[in-house]
Image (cartoon, rainbow, N blue to C red):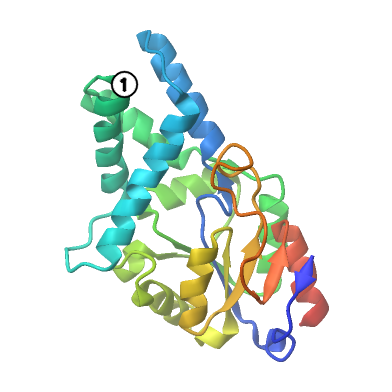
Amino acid sequence: MLLFPGAYRVLRLIKGFLFDVYGTVCDWHKPMTEMIESYTSAKGITEDASEFARQWRGAYASETARRASSRQPFVPLATLTLKALKELAKVRLSTELTDSDAGSLNGVWRRLRPWPDTVAGLSALRLIAPCATCSNGSYVDMTPLAEHLGIVWDAVLGSEASGFYKPHPQTYLLSVEALAIEPSECVMVAAHQKDLVHARAHGLLTAFIKRPDEFGGVGQGEELEPTSEWDFVASSLLELAELVRKRV
């Protein structure tokens, strides 16, 4: 665990935590891979389910990034993941999914799995300050996902609450505002360091959580080491809570 210089003078001001969810709080890759394997096996289709999962995630992420810098009306993520799934199925599976199959498969975003430290770590952090999402995820998915993961949020914020996708400034700033605190009193927690770059640019503190298995294996997209001097670097949410408690 590592605490970078510069954090010491502000730690006593922490009044809230914002979290990226997919990849940081829960494992999306393994549940998605298993679901795709089950579907393709039942249909007699040969497919690299792990790669399908990564491409599906990449497709929606590219679209949210594009929309963050465009003037298009906001569309909930559940709509974008469904569209990305259907398009990818045409290309990789050479099939057009029925509405029923597509809806069932897209529901996996509500059935992801917590990392081993998630439940205890989030509970420990909520004893320090309120914890809320700052995710691109949809309302329709975030609430059932939290129940499935066995966690409790103090608020569900982020893209749908703000009307903007990360990394638009308002996604972060309106989420902080909803907690009735200042950006300098809020820690953005993420396994994705581009997320932290933008959060820091808007005055938030930053916590990088290492998730070496996020994409299914080393070298597939996992971020293993810090690329900047984040306020906190930890290998789990429990470790982050320990770091914060020592300095508050």
For the point 70% across and 67% down, the residue is 233
Q: Amino acid at mark 1?
A: Leu
For the point 69% across and 72% down, the residue is 232
**Classed neighbour count for the residue bearing mark 1: other residues with Cα under 10 Å, few (<14), some (14–19), many (≥20):** some
Going by the picture, which residue comes out furthest to the bottom? 9
Q: Nearer the viewer, residue 80 or 45?
A: 45
For the point 24% across and 34% down, the residue is 87
Q: Quadrant of residue 156?
A: bottom left
Instruction: Name the residue beneath numbered marker 1.
Output: 93
> Helix or strand or loop: what does disc 1 sit on?
helix
Q: Is residue 129 in sight in this rendering?
A: yes
Q: Quadrant of residue 4?
A: bottom right
Residue 214 locus on image (x, y percent): 58, 44
Residue 196 locus on image (x, y percent): 53, 70
In the displayed structure, does residue 124 sit left or right of residue 102? right
In the displayed structure, does residue 163 sit left or right of residue 44? left
Going by the picture, which residue comes out furthest to the right? 246
Residue 218 locus on image (x, y percent): 64, 42
Quadrant in the picture for the N terminus: bottom right
In the displayed structure, does residue 83 sit left or right of residue 244? left
Residue 229 locus on image (x, y percent): 65, 76
Q: Is residue 181 in sight in this rendering?
A: no
Q: Nearer the viewer, residue 121 or 70?
A: 70
Quadrant in the picture for the C terminus: bottom right
Instruction: Say if 103 sits above or below 224 in the image.
Output: above
Instruction: Say if 23 sits above or below 162 in the image.
Output: above
Going by the picture, which residue comes out furthest to the left? 72
Instruction: Say if 194 sits above or below 89 in the image.
Output: below
For the point 38% across and 77% down, the residue is 174
How many numbered discs, if any?
A: 1
In the displayed structure, does residue 171 sit left or right of residue 4? left
